[in-house]
Amino acid sequence: MVTLPINGIDGNHTAKIARLSILSTFGRLTMAFNQIVLPLFVLAIGLDASFYGVLVAAAGYVQGVVLFPAGWFSDRRGRGIAILLGGLFAGSCLLAIPFITDSILILVVYAITGIGTGFTRTSIDSLIADHTRKGDERTRSFGYTTATATMAAMIGSFVAGLLLDPIAFPFISDDMTRYAILFWAMGFFRIATGVFGIYTERWLNVNDPVEKEQKEIMEIEDEDPQKERHDTETALLFGTSQLLMGISSGMVIPYLILWIYAAFGPDPIVLGSVPAIAGITLATGTLAVGFFSERIGKIRTISVLYTLTPILMIGLVYSPWFLLMLVFYVARNAVANMNRPAFNSLFMGEVSLSRRARSLSITRVMWQFPRQTGTLMTAYLLGFFGGIVSFGLIVFPIAMLLYPVSVIPLYIAVKRNSARQPLEIPSEIEIEE
């Protein structure tokens, strides 16, 4: 078994994390803008929350369809080229949306952005895992990259709300011009993600010593016929966890900003500040998870955070004042999302390097389809509850109960793999503390 001392980290480690953090940031900025821009854009063109739900679901379904082919392409052809193709594809669609006036065409074009997202997201996470060692180094690296991207996303949400507020930029008289600027910004950041992605992979292949070590491991893994079955079973168990979360998240998260807008009626600049403020706590929490979850235990960390999620959702929807609601929003957003370094590091350490993107794509597929089904189902259920406010009061807390339940498949997967590990070829380099 190959071993490497933990203090043998290459001198380029800081530069490596910086590049991976910038890459993650470009990807997250589009999501940050979109969180504010898309729901308000739908209302601005005379449509309602139901159409918004269909819009989000359509893009998610398309992403789900391409995830596994995108993962296979990433494993075979390289992370960089997959990120480039995804960025160019999604960016081009976002640049085109401001020129479209027909609602059906908007639906089609926005749905197609799911193809680009499917190629990009899986490949970025796999690239980070490829160039970090299992254990503390990888968990901290996911912590750094996620926290940096989250801080940038915080700024993006605020800027989106600021630009949409007529008071902030009175010289922009046409509301559609404001939306066009933001869609073009999202398109630019998607394309920048693709270009920087292929540049980052090439730099890592030349300057990162982990790359050589990982290639040697891939050669060993390819000789083990049982590895493929092992990876598939592990991905399905992690995917079951994602399936439960996907249903819950799909019924709540796409509608949360609209619910706040309907329940409290804040100005766009204030509405944009809500996720921006939440980003500060989320970034700090993500960094803390990256540093301490290895000591506490990654699954234990995830369990505690997910148990708090439905409790905080109850406080959010039943808060009588906007500021109190904001406190619960910030807290719920943090505990539901700050586990990402622990979850990503846990999963990447349980599957083979040579099938990492394909294995990750299985979990993402099992997330995407339930996620979009939950969103689509909510779009049709809103009318039965008399609107989004009453729907949220009843359904949001109930849906969040699936978060703590979703940890059970993770326990099963890790326990199963631990029992089989002595019989199998190691999938990663072990680090001596």
Image (cartoon, helix red, strand yellow):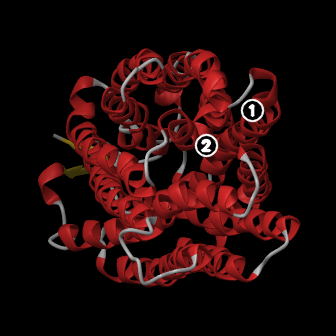
Residue 378's tag is 1
Mark 2, Cα crowd under 10 Å, few <14 / some 14-19 / many 20+, is many
**Residue 286 pos. (x, y %):** 29, 42
- Taking 111 as reference, is 389 above or below it? above
What residue appears at the point 38 percent right and 68 percent down from the top-left corner? 167
- Taking 282 as reference, is 181 above or below it? below
Mark 1, Cα crowd under 10 Å, few <14 / some 14-19 / many 20+, is many
Q: Is residue 42 visible?
A: yes
What residue appears at the point 32 percent right and 62 percent down from the top-left corner? 155
Taking the image as shown, residue 377 lies to the left or right of residue 351, namely right
Taking the image as shown, residue 90 lies to the left or right of residue 316, namely right
Is there CB contact under 8 Å for labels 1 and 2? yes
Taking the image as shown, residue 106 lies to the left or right of residue 227, namely right
Numbered disc 2: secondary structure: helix
Q: For mark 2, what is the residue?
A: 254
**Residue 340 pos. (x, y %):** 41, 41
**Residue 79 pos. (x, y %):** 55, 71
* Among numbered discs 1 and 2, the one appearing first in the sequence: 2
Q: Quadrant of the N terminus?
A: top left
Q: Amino acid at mark 1?
A: Thr
Q: Amino acid at mark 2?
A: Pro
- Taking 174 as reference, is 309 above or below it? above
Numbered disc 1: secondary structure: helix
**Residue 111 pos. (x, y %):** 77, 62
Judge by depth and name the residue closer to the eye, 88 or 199.
88
